[in-house]
Image (cartoon, rainbow, N blue to C red):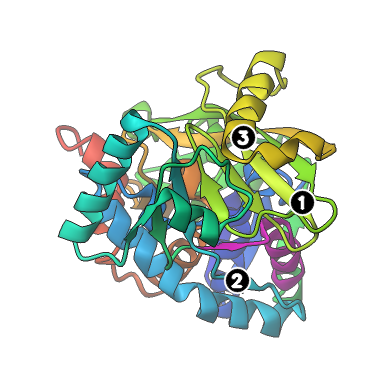
Amino acid sequence: MKIKISIIGGGVIGLSLGWQLARRGAEVEIYERDTAGKGAGWVAAGMLTPQAELGFEEIEMFNLSRKSLELYPKFLDELKEDSGMLVKMDNCGSLFAGFDRDDMARLRRLYDFREKVGLPAKWLTGSEAKELEPMLSPKCTCGLWMPDDAQVENRDLLDALHIAVKNRGCKIHENANVNSVMIVNGKVKAIVVNGKELETSNIVVAAGAWSKQVEGIPENILPPVRPVKGQIMSLRMEGDNRVTHAVRGRDVYLVPKADGRLIVGASNEEMGFDTNPTAGEIYRLLERAWETVPGIYEYPIQEIKVGLRPGSRDHEPIVGDSDIEGLYFATGHYRSGILLTPITAFELSDWIITGKKSEVLAPFQLSRFYRETV
């Protein structure tokens, strides 16, 4: 008898998890409040940058991110098998650019830390940085190069996942409002969708920024996840003067895409569920991007989007089981949803199917927030 699993959320995490569970023989249904694959993952830049994102006290998070990046080739190979789409990974590296003494001091600290933990980061003079990326401002005085970082075309990834999920027999229900989950005697019993009670024995909450809004989950184990607003834009690179590497300036990143788009992002705002783009943040992003790469001045603006990232209390993912039998979480991925997709899908699907907890995911379980009550 097939194990039956209901997934709340049809973003990159929900789709990839449903697909991998179906590959392992489960009967999967995905419930998405809007359109599957068109949320925060669609708006993202598609960066796979564990080295660039590494903070001074985030070694466990870095190790998870690095393992997920290593899994990407396998993930994309399997995705091609089930979707027929070739989603390419671009090993473009990450280049931090500095422009004054403060930048140099900040980048030197980042470089020293990466050297201490054994990462292949390289310190660059201003001229070396501009040789690597000729579009950088002439005012660039230094750079930090991390060659192992990469990127993926996130929209192609989501389109391929949508196809693969259906080809594996998963059912996707769009515009499906999950009213609540039903729990009886400490076990999952059903999910209530658009007012209709549907029996199930396993539920995965992968609802991104809305994960804390799911009713029926006991208050003491609601995931501490809130929306973090991110404004982002696409410029159209024209002619031969094109950015060729993922570049980070002062509070801005510029990510070139194969189709000629240049992604510029992103704001980081605590504004609840507001999804309106604002003149001030767009101006700030463009100003910082222009300071880093002056050539963008002539690029047409193609698109301005807003995404709501699911941020947990410590900005690290919440993936694993709970005190309720059959209730799992896969949320709180914050700015790393695309990067952490393979390891979340592989590890949690194995966990659910086999019942054997993942050692890799152990530090990222919900219980870390509720040790006194769980």
Instruction: Identify the residue at horizontal 47%, vertical 41% (top origin).
Output: 334
Instruction: Identify the residue at horizontal 68%, vertical 64% (top origin).
Output: 157
Mark 2 neighbour class, 10 Å CA radius: few under 14, some 14 to 19, many 20 or more: some
- Which region of the structure is painted magenta? 150-165
Q: Which residue is mark 1?
A: 261
Q: Is residue 341 visible?
A: yes
Q: Give x and y (percent) for residue 44.
A: 63, 46
Q: Which mark is residue 289?
A: 3
Q: Secondary structure at mark 2?
A: strand
Evaluate if marks 3 and 2 touch, with contact meaning CB atoms under 8 Å apart: no
Which of these two is toward me, 162 or 308?
308
The stretch drawn in magenta includes residue 151: yes
Q: Give x and y (percent) for residue 268.
A: 51, 27
| Mark earlier in primary sequence (3, 2) | 2
**Residue type highlighted by circle 3:** Ala
Q: Is residue 332 visible?
A: no
**Residue type highlighted by circle 1:** Arg
| Mark earlier in primary sequence (2, 1) | 2
